[in-house]
Amino acid sequence: MPPSPIRIAILLAARNGAPFIAAQLASLAGQEYRHWRLVVSDDGSTDGTAEAVTRFALEHPGRDISLIDGPRAGATRNFLSLIGAVQPGEGFAFCDQDDVWLSDRLSRGVRALGGLDGPALHVTRTTICDQTLRPLCPAPLYRRAPSFRNALVQACTPGNTMLVNPQGAALLAAGAPAAAAASVISHDWWSYQMIAGAGGQVIRDPAQTVLYRQHPGNVMGRNDTARAMLARLQGLGRGDYGGWLRANAHALSGAAELLTGENRALLRRFGAALGMGGRAWRPSSCASAFIARPAWERRRCWPLRPPDALGAGRGRDRGARRLAARLKARAFAQEADRCGKRAMPFRRPPPPDCAAKGSAFILPAAPRLGPDHHGSSSGAIRPPPQ
């Protein structure tokens, strides 16, 4: 007798999404995989979002559709609270109010996760679209293999494509209170960290299953344009990245019993490098990124001082200012390359995946490493792709 199909709880965090939510709800109704229910957490909308959900429920009387009040503490907290609505034995999928799902969004993930033991999550790529859903380009394809080390320093599992199996859902439900208490910046980044930290499987599917709508109200938005890269660089200079790492580390420490012994030890080292051990000194986030790298990537490392200063928010450091100027130039050059215009000259062309990732940069010290290495914003040195 074949096993019963897994029921998926679709967790939709909503707030003032009336212009777009009807299209997203219609795409849920068109899913090939039919064993799902919908939970919408409305975070205090004033524009008819709740009415749109109510109409959708009336149009689909055979569906289990719930509308609940959100915590009114931001999108991340709304998603974290929704995890508590998942019932035992269910998997779940995060859902953004302004996207549109392709018909195989759920079915691909269910097939990939079927039969796996232990916590697991499945993510795909998105198709980046304008406000009218006109396709612009596919989202970048992340090349680094998923792991807990990588999860500590890089958010590369888009929540709007994420599907979590029942074991993973139970794990995240157990860890969600610690994440909420730590005020993590991103529910999907934290989910990746928890699943990987518990020894679970992370499946990265290159298929595109979500139309990712770009509009002025996006909470985060795409990260592969010059403007987006500059915004992230400014946040790095303010120390935002270091703050995010500390919040994530606090959340993981609050649920450390759910992690493997090896990953608990790594988390302790990571927290110590972030200055969370009660010592007076406070190394920057980039020092922790250095610890989070595999040993083979630490053999030859570019000097950490300028990126350290940026990661710690000490943007007035002279070396950090020089690095910031170089990174800005690189961002503009990558955008010019993408548009087919003349790019700014550099000492050495970027490796093939730099422009695609949008987060990899050539650092001033890179020539010391020889022609076969390049640096990335996570502080890792790795060989170029074959």
Image (spheres, rainbow, N blue to C red):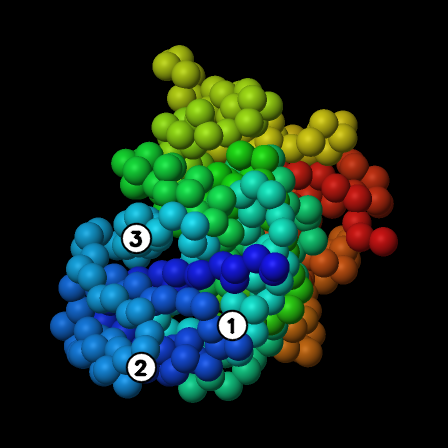
Circle 3/circle 1 CB separation < 8 Å: no
Q: Residue at x 37, y 74 (%)?
A: 98
Q: Position of residue 383 (x, y in %)?
A: 79, 44
Circle 3/circle 2 CB separation < 8 Å: no
Q: Is 77 displayed left or right of 375 in the figure?
A: left
Question: Residue beneath label 1, please?
Answer: 33
The type of residue carrying mark 3 is Ala
Q: Position of residue 203 (x, y in %)?
A: 63, 53
Q: Residue at x 62, y 48 (%)?
A: 116
Q: Residue at x 61, y 60 (%)?
A: 2
Question: Residue beneath label 3, please?
Answer: 85
Is residue 381 shown to the viewer in this render?
yes
The quarter of the displayed image where residue 171 is located: top left
Gap in Å between the C-alphas at discs 3 and 2?
A: 21 Å
Gap in Å between the C-alphas at discs 1 and 2?
A: 16 Å
Who comes first in sequence, dot 1 or dot 2? 1
Q: Nearer the viewer, residue 62 or 138?
A: 62
Count of all numbered marks drawn on residues in the image:
3
The type of residue carrying mark 2 is His
Please, is residue 204 above or below residue 224 in the view? Answer: above
Badge 1: few (under 14), some or many (20 or more) residues near its Cα, within 10 Å?
Answer: some
Is residue 228 shown to the viewer in this render?
no
Question: Residue beneath label 2, please?
Answer: 60
Q: Position of residue 15 (x, y in %)?
A: 24, 67
Badge 2: few (under 14), some or many (20 or more) residues near its Cα, within 10 Å?
Answer: few
Q: Nearer the viewer, residue 44 or 166?
A: 166
Q: Nearer the viewer, residue 204 or 346?
A: 204
Q: Residue at x 80, y 52 (%)?
A: 385
Q: Position of residue 274 (x, y in %)?
A: 46, 26
